[in-house]
Amino acid sequence: MESWFILSGKDATSVELRDVAVPEPKAGELLVKVHAAGLNRGEFIAGHGLSGGAAKVGGIEAAGEVVKVGDGVKEFNVGDRVMGRAYGAFAEYTIHRIGDAMPAPAKLSWEEAAGAAIAYLTAYDMLWPGGELKANEWLLVAGASAGVGVASVQLGKLIGAKVIGTSASADKLKKLAALGLDLGLQNRNGGFEKAVMDATGGKGVNLVVNNVGGSVFAECIRALAYRGRLATVGYVDGVVKAELDILALHSKRLKLFGVSNKMRSAAEIAEGVRNFSRDVLPALASGHLRPVIDKVFAFAELPQAKAHMEASAHLGKIIIRN
């Protein structure tokens, strides 16, 4: 079968199409015929688990049809529609671990199902167990137009929170308003603190999702309310060090946490998937929540899809369709 690999150089990554054998599912795994797969910026960042010239199989989320099950699998059968985290999703066939796979609701297209996993699971991790966001609280999403940002806006509104989002694009903010964004701030790398404090009556927000990185970290701290929480999930600005106001951390009893699966065990990830299936999957199944798809590319167009993502021109998920 054909499979896309990601090659990491010193400062950038590239992709290469290779012929490989169809994988065989091990115990607790599913072999799935891929109908669509989602792009995620993190796996295309140079140096993420790779060193000069090394290659890894590409694609970490997919939606498709089960064609074979490994030993001990009772949760899914051949022919079932599934979606979720996958190994080698930019291919004709992929492997899902049972702990990663979820039923793909019939109301979702293959493209929507492919985009309903990583970004939404990440947003769930920040808003539910990490951020403990509640109805009528304030959420600030710094960098609201990429996949995790859009998912955070949507899930914030699903909870019943009031949501502020930042983006450099007025057009993207207008589209986010249609998804329920309460206040859009056209700021690329900061400058949102005053507007946030004005909107919240001087109290600040209860939770910040920082998709931007270190360039806005200090301002995110200043925008937090008493007992506020700050989730750091991305650093598209490339800034990985920032000033920390320890006095604010201390006096406002703030909670700062990072969100990543790099060091999580399979059991921890599976627990998150189960909780997501309980709290969010019903909204996807009913059609109340629809993943936002920016653009769909053909399988052979992965290089173009990667370039589109790296140009930060998108709103929501970028998908390749088999």
Image (cartoon, rainbow, N blue to C red):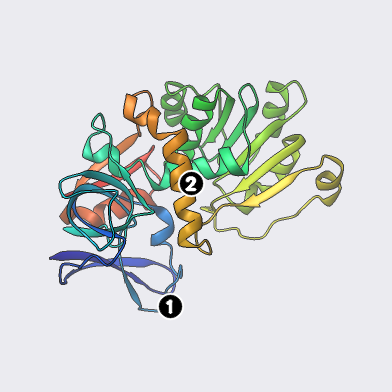
Q: Is residue 105 left or right of residue 312?
A: left
Q: Residue at x 39, y 34 (%)?
A: 281
Q: Is residue 318 above or below residue 3?
A: above
Numbered circles on residues, count: 2
Of the two numbered discs 2 and 1 on the same chain, state the one appearing first in sequence. Answer: 1
Q: Is residue 271 left or right of residue 59?
A: right
Q: Amino acid at mark 2?
A: Thr
Provide residue 200's location: percent of width, then percent of height. Answer: 71, 23
Q: Is residue 262 above or below residue 54?
A: above
Picture quadrant of residue 31: bottom left
Q: Quadrant of the N terminus?
A: bottom left
Q: Residue at x 51, y 53 (%)?
A: 236
Q: Amino acid at mark 1?
A: Ser
Provide residue 53's location: percent of width, then percent of height. Answer: 35, 78
Residue at numbered disc 2: 122
Decide which of 85, 163 is in the foreground and name it.
85
Decide which of 98, 41 is in the foreground and name it.
98
Q: Is residue 163 left or right of residue 204?
A: left
Q: Secondary structure at mark 1?
A: loop
Residue at numbered disc 1: 51
